[in-house]
Amino acid sequence: MNAAVATRSQAAAVVTSRPTLTADLTAVAANTRTIATRAPGAALMAVVKADGFGHGAADVARTALAAGATRLGVTSVDEALELRAARIGAPILSWLNPVDADFGAAVAAGVDLAVASRPHLDAVVAAAPGTGPARVHLHLDTGMARDGAPPAEWAQLCRAARLAEQRGQLRVDGVMGHLACADVPADRSNAIGRTRFAWGLEVARSLGLRPAHRHLAATAATLTDPRTHHTLVRIGAGLFGIDPSRTVRLRPALTLTAPVVSVRRVRAGTPVAYGHTWTAPAATHLGLLPLGYADGLPRAASGRAEVQVRGRRRPIVGLLSMDQAVVDLGDDDPVEPGEVATVFGPGDDGEPTAAEWATWAGTIEHEIVTGIGARVARRCRTAATELWSVR
Ligand SMILES: *Cc1c(COP(=O)(O)O)cnc(C)c1O
């Protein structure tokens, strides 16, 4: 071992910085405003499910509300109650509500509930805590065959909801649908979904319901088809700079960095990591990053993924491990332990983006940003201070 290598090993012992995920809330605010201008006639619901797509649900909720959103959407009652616990008072809709969800707590906390079946409706009525009628949004399946009510059950659901409304047990505040292929505007299913939604609204009306909120569009439909806007659009991906329609410039908000914790020089012919899937073609320096697939770097990206170190793209070599990634730093520009690698970011300085990681792994950006593991430290950047704060 030469002196330089010994120095690096000693330096590695004092490296303390951790892999860190930074959410740029100024980007979330800008994206919210950009999308609001594309749907001027509709209110904007900020969808902050899955911890705000990995960006921090409460931080994103506050940011989007300050930038023009008026409502929040989440998947589960638990997610909604977490936002209430963070003292967020805006209207919240929870849409995936198994019959055994805590509807009593939800209604007591003023959380609106999507309802897609008679058993759901009955469970909400039974659990309503007597603090006033539960507010529900009836959910019609407009082509997903997932969580909305099948059209064959729609009239019956509307009728039962109207009856409960007349008894003062609940109020139907909304009707919702969801499109399966909105990212492909020409897909026939979009017209079918729009028509089915219009039919569902008409059925609800004819049975006496007067839902104030009628909503079909998520990000892609909002950006490509004003006929889907109705009174409210539900925006998730777009808040975070993901534009499935590729029609507007949005800003990615997440940056993932990790320190190089050690550097070693290897000879040509040195095989690297599990399975020896990569062998150094020439002498080089290998840097170690302390994160792997348990932290959300998809193992399927092994062999293609890159990070940025000292302003240069460097390949991750060999198979990604659960907790570690090996980077080929080259032989000409020695990197010191403690220097920080950018795993992905907005791409401003040539660093990889989450979209590139998705391509490398054969998935979509959503899965990359929502998949970053709990061991990674979180912080955010806010407009007020331009400072980075730890959450
Ligand atoms: C996730 C989700 C959204 C948000 O979709 P994006 O494409 O991320 O904007 C809207 N509605 C429902 C029902 C969802 O599940």
Image: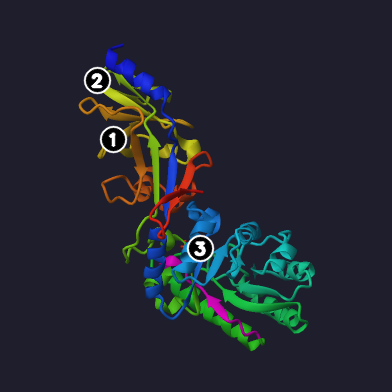
Foreground mark, 3 or 1, reads 3
The earlier-in-sequence mark between 3 and 2 is: 3
Tag 2 residue: 283
- Amino acid type at mark 2: Ala
Rendered position, 233 above or below 80: below
Query: Residue, x 56% and y 73% (percent of image)?
Result: 176
Tag shown at residue 260: none
Q: Residue furthest front?
A: 385
State the residue in front, 315 or 277.
315
Identify the image quadrant of residue 144: bottom right
**Residue 292 point in image, percent of width and height:** 45, 35
**Residue 130 point in image, percent of width and height:** 79, 72
State the residue in front, 71 or 367.
71
The earlier-in-sequence mark between 1 and 2 is: 2
Q: Marks 3/1: CA distance? A: 37 Å
Q: Marks 1/2: CA distance? A: 15 Å
Q: Marks 3/2: CA distance? A: 51 Å
- In the figure, is residue 378 to the left or right of 159? left
Decide whether residue 308 is among the magenta residues: no
Extent of the magenta region: 209-220
Tag 3 residue: 62
Tag shown at residue 314: 1
Q: Secondary structure at mark 3?
A: helix
State the residue in front, 16 or 42.
16
